[in-house]
Amino acid sequence: MKRIYMDHAATTPVAPEVLKAMMPFFGRKYGNASSIHSFGQEARDALDNSREILSRFINAEFEELIFTSGGTESDNIAIIGAALAGKEKNHIITSRIEHHAVLHTCKFLEKYGFKVTYLAVDRYGFVKPEDVEKAITKNTVLVSIMHANNEIGTIEPVREIGRICRDAGVLFHTDAVQSFGKIPLNVKKMNIDMLSASAHKIYGPKGAGLLYIRNGVAIKPLMHGGGHEFGMRSGTENIPGIVGFAKAAELAGRNMDKWREHETRLRKMLARGVLEIPDSWLNGHPEKRIPGNASFCFRFIEGESLVVHLSMIGVAASTGSACSSKDLRPSHVLTAIGLKPFDAHGSLRLTLGKDNTKEDVDFVIKELPGIVSKLRKISPMGRK
Amino acid sequence: MKRIYMDHAATTPVAPEVLKAMMPFFGRKYGNASSIHSFGQEARDALDNSREILSRFINAEFEELIFTSGGTESDNIAIIGAALAGKEKNHIITSRIEHHAVLHTCKFLEKYGFKVTYLAVDRYGFVKPEDVEKAITKNTVLVSIMHANNEIGTIEPVREIGRICRDAGVLFHTDAVQSFGKIPLNVKKMNIDMLSASAHKIYGPKGAGLLYIRNGVAIKPLMHGGGHEFGMRSGTENIPGIVGFAKAAELAGRNMDKWREHETRLRKMLARGVLEIPDSWLNGHPEKRIPGNASFCFRFIEGESLVVHLSMIGVAASTGSACSSKDLRPSHVLTAIGLKPFDAHGSLRLTLGKDNTKEDVDFVIKELPGIVSKLRKISPMGRK
Amino acid sequence: MGYGYSKKVIELFRHPKNIGEIKNADGTGKVGNPVCGDVMVMYLSIGKNKKGEEIIKDAKVKTFGCIAAISTSSVLTEMIKGKTIKQAQRITKNELVKKLGGLPVQKIHCSVLAVDALDKAIKDYYKKGGKHGQKG
Amino acid sequence: MGYGYSKKVIELFRHPKNIGEIKNADGTGKVGNPVCGDVMVMYLSIGKNKKGEEIIKDAKVKTFGCIAAISTSSVLTEMIKGKTIKQAQRITKNELVKKLGGLPVQKIHCSVLAVDALDKAIKDYYKKGGKHGQKG
Ligand SMILES: Cc1ncc(COP(=O)(O)O)c(C=O)c1O
Ligand SMILES: Cc1ncc(COP(=O)(O)O)c(C=O)c1O
């Protein structure tokens, strides 16, 4: 059976070019970047070179970028790091549609005396910059608003929010895990103080992430030890992972326009076809979204069943259904944009990548209606 | 120039068998282990299988093992996690020769009201179990004593210390980054509550580590997010890294006796030859040490210069010299076993691995005296 | 490739049994899962066996929910067909789970849902007076 | 493969210049680095140039320390040979670092060490009365 991968927001295959760049660093140039000898220097050179590439990629300085194990760690360092450094200030502003890596970290801080404002979003998932402005108090230490949402693809007005924070003298962090490599990012122009990204979302390897920390921003590290990464993240550097991350960013930079057009075209085609199904709709904004993201809802059916049926015919997709989540609540993103739990239950996320084809899309458009109606037949809900 | 790697305590090459096991998980079985579809299930199966292998390796249960990004993170989770869960208790016991991942984490906690006892060691680097016993108070939440020291190779009486902690109802963590895969480990027999290990020290990849947490031990996570790893370590799992770690442990398990004998033999040969150099000695205990670890001191010269000279003839080594450390203080381990800073300055660590040969050792024995005497000639210290 | 489920569960999910409604059912039980939003409706048709005991002649179910919900409701209808009401009522969620070759921990509540739907359908039958004139 | 050092530093480390002692040196300066434990001893032999100014005829050094310490002491002896004492004293650590093509930040203190050793050697020369009868 041919398999069609449409879950690129969850993770992506490592691109052949990326794997090729990584290969020398497993068995041959395997030194520890802290070692003085020639093996160590090879590793150090690769580390420096990767940092150079990735910092240029977002218009940051070399020393403004630290490597982490992934997006979750970057988010945690940014938020806990700012909280630990915040002295008397104990207020954080974020949104209701952040990734759990942000939300659960904020919840954790609430147990230690922090007050967190979770801003509401509109039906497209947009945070209003004015709401950020209004929420800022003299106790606010950090604003954390994601650049693009992982479920519905909505791109937030990060630049405006950054401007407001900069003017108010409040730190601004953005989780750019879903946008990094897909749409242009410029930390200077966008008034960003901290930015998280993760390699495995852009055809890089799992286990490598980065956190941009603007020069002058003094946050505390989360992990302590050998003082790696300018003292901000201890632990032997994952050189193959970091090298792969840099190569993935290079590829993404070089192909950004091409891939964006390709994915946008396929996504529109997909949406057009899928929305022929009765009682269905697209979540998020029709235009201001990550190119490859298509988030649907089908009333009266449940997403996990849908995803498994799709998987049985070779199609990899995801859902925000309660049944598929660990805490058995429907996606907080879908409820935040106003969906009722019953409707959120029937969500299906198809996220396209560079290697998806028109044939892939056609196949899904052809097969999905049958699966939806099969599940609707066994459902007690819905029109007869 | 032939290069001879004798810095296996810093990191190791990824073994060909390990890399082979990892390869399918980059470009082919690249799913996210949290995804429901078939790609996700492949990843989940690989994750479960690796956890099975690694938990069996230390005689732990499947659900007692979480994957991390490396040894540093494991140490941080264990220590900060225990501290956060410790309620009123605020006392931690550790030793003066721990890795910075433990020591600096303890220092961090001191800023937040924790009291830390740093136990002294004897001239071999041994912690006395009685000292642990005496140091325990009703406020003690955690004892963290490493299994084997990374600089001088000394193997601590962990089992006895574990017994004492168990009897006193105090959590016992051991940093086994240097011993894991090299000498037998059995968490049940050794009365261990938490244990840290890292893949890249045993021919596995950088970016993968583990923390054993005994069933019933309730510590708090360091990173928050999607609730991966039984809620103890959020973040998309690094499947290739984890698979590589499991394969490395399998190799280490299968070859443990063979490699231990090989490395012990070479190390003894090396020590015999090197100690012909006047004003030199071996640090640590002559027998109770990690097989491949040889730690020397040469008076009147400085280690960084020594290491660079060795590197120039192709030999990779390390030193605890102040000059090579970030904080410009000589190794805390060497001073803790009673060396004066001047002597610690002249330290050289050669750590052998499975692929080192008698020829490698002969070469070092042949070349080292010349380098030492060259450096002694330009030194103002020493006998004339 | 079990998506975390047993073979049996997946089999039942692919080919669910006894799906549908029974027109003018003798008992109907509708339950919703307050935790995750699943909904299940069980339809029973009741008859008598030779001994004169009330038995479940037919059972059908409709499920709005995940694989676990679909397969537990499906397997329960299979188990109860032909059984006396008493026997059917004795079926526990543990038996269901066992019959399915296990369920992921976080899905155990789905098996409760099926048992509850059956229970409600039987109660409904008795509330309607019991076609066969008996009280529960 | 510079071990974090410039080419020039490594070159000087491989082939250090002016290593050794000067018997009955006119000035000797020994300094120790309180931070990391390096020790440096500078030996000067003083003469006069045609103008009658005191010049450094010869300089030698011994170093117990890292690459940075060895190379800075080496390059300093090269720089001062033939210079007048005044000129030698005017050499700053920045000039040294520049001459070496830079030093890693955490090694800058080694350049201070070399300058201090020279300074002390010159002071020692004057303390001994100055072979050539001048006071500093
Ligand atoms: C928006 C967002 N933030 C954070 C993360 C976490 O990244 P990682 O899985 O690399 O820890 C993800 C992906 O899972 C994401 O989509
Ligand atoms: C004893 C010990 N603990 C902890 C660590 C840290 O492990 P990692 O480099 O994987 O973070 C090391 C190695 O650097 C070590 O030798």
Image: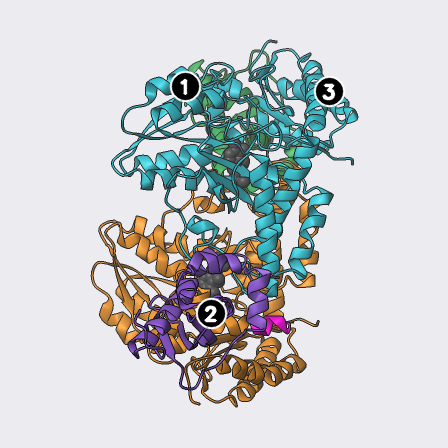
Chain colours: A cyan, B orange, C green, D purple
Alpha-carbon distance for marks 1 and 2?
65 Å
The residue that label 1 is drawn on is A120
Q: Are discs 1 and 3 located on one and the same chain? A: yes
Residue drawn at (52%, 17%) of the image: A343
Q: How would you rate the neighbour count of disc 1 (Cα within 10 Å): few for under 14, some for 14-19, many for 20 or more?
A: some
The residue stretch that appears in magenta: B309-315
- On whether ligand 1 comes within 8 Å of the CB at mark 3, the answer is no
For the residue marked with disc 2, what is the amino acid? Ser
The image shows residue C85, relative to residue B136, as above or below, that is: above
The residue that label 2 is drawn on is D73
Judged left or right of residue D14, residue B113 is left
Residue drawn at (28%, 62%) of the image: B169
For the residue marked with disc 3, what is the amino acid? Ile
Q: Are marks 1 and 3 in contact (CB under 8 Å)?
A: no
1 or 3: tag closer to the N-terminus: 1
Alpha-carbon distance for marks 3 and 2?
75 Å
For the residue marked with disc 1, what is the amino acid? Ala
Label ID, residue A365: 3
